[in-house]
Image (cartoon, helix red, strand yellow):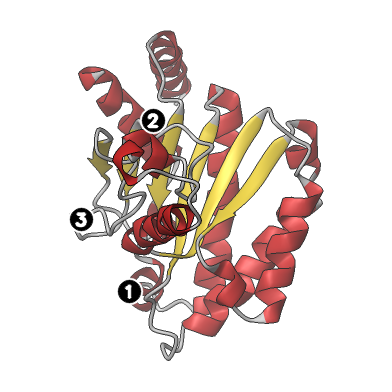
Amino acid sequence: MLEKIRGMIKKEKYVLKISMPRHIAITTDGIEKWALKNNTPYKDAYKRSFLILKNTIKLQIRLKIPILSFYILDENADKENESYPYLLDAIVSMLNDLANNEFVNKNKIKIFVLGKWYHLPGKVVDSIKRAIGETKDYDSFFVNFCINYNGQEEIVDAFKFLGMQIKAGKLDPELIDKDSIKESLYTSYFLPPGLMIKNGTRKETSGFLLWDSVNTKIYFTNKLWPDFDKTEFMDAIKDYQKWD
């Protein structure tokens, strides 16, 4: 066992010597499927899932990765699904915890929420506002939560914003380029992700950071999110480094 631990430490040190992605995007797919497969109540499955998420943020700090983005809730999610209320409750609990978390404060982690979260129930909106407000002055690390998010809608909203600028006479349509579109996205302030870790059994990006992911390397874990761990995270980074 001791030799195995030493081997893991040696491999991790080797990984740290090679270039690291500055922005990693991670999907949290498969929570409901995991709950059904393991005969676990949805409430407990989401509790486990967000504990894993917080552990992943700790890895972010340890590896000095500036930006993490998590895909938490699709705008097109089935609101009639019996697991949906438990997901909303888990989001509230997670954000309230992060808003007043010693680890977050110590490492000056700024929390952003991307998507049309303001359309969600009041308790969710309040928890989001609190997390954003409590961390607004931090700038050492950044954690983005995509909540009530859709990649195509992000681009549509960017075009609407540019259209309003044209209508107001503030923008010449001929001057629209990739940079002006990027500046109009929810993610305007962030570097595009260098690595996307796609959990779940479906080999698709689900429109996650659709505009920003054109050159993103994608790592498919083939695992449901509640089974995600440090080993998968490090394996994804090592895979990224093979192609960097």
Q: Is residue 44 above or below residue 184?
A: below
Q: Is residue 79 left or right of residue 214?
A: right
Q: Give the alpha-carbon distance from disc 3 to disc 1, as whole Å.
A: 22 Å
Q: Which residue is found at the position 35% from the left and 65% from the top?
A: 30
Q: Which residue type carries mark 2?
A: Met
If you read the primary sequence from the N terminus, does the residue marked by circle 2 or circle 3 appear first? 3
Pick the residue in front: 169 or 180. Answer: 169
Q: Which residue is found at the position 32% from the left and 33% from the top?
A: 236
Pick the residue in front: 187 or 221. Answer: 187
On the rendered image, what quadrant is the N terminus found in? top left
Q: Could you tell me which secondary element the residue under label 3 belongs to?
A: loop
* Residue that badge 3 annotates: 204
Q: Give the alpha-carbon distance from disc 2 to disc 3, as whole Å.
A: 21 Å
Q: Is residue 147 above or below residue 41?
A: above
Pick the residue in front: 231 or 97. Answer: 97
* Residue that badge 1 annotates: 37
Q: Is residue 172 above or below residue 78?
A: above
Q: Is residue 145 left or right of residue 97?
A: left
Residue 204 locus on image (x, y percent): 20, 55
Say few, some or many: other residues with alpha carbon within 10 Å of mark 1 (under 14 / 14 to 19 / 20 or more).
few
* Residue 13, image quadrant: top left
Residue located farthest toward the left when viewing the structure as drawn: 203
Say few, some or many: other residues with alpha carbon within 10 Å of mark 3 (under 14 / 14 to 19 / 20 or more).
few
Residue 135 locus on image (x, y percent): 76, 44
Q: Give the alpha-carbon distance from disc 1 to disc 2, as whole Å.
A: 26 Å
* Residue 171, image quadrant: top left
Q: Which residue is found at the position 39% from the left and 30% from the top?
A: 234
* Residue that badge 2 annotates: 234
Q: Which residue is found at the position 45% from the left and 37% from the top?
A: 230
Nearest-to-viewer mark from 3 and 1: 3
Pick the residue in front: 181 or 165. Answer: 165
Q: Which residue type carries mark 1?
A: Lys
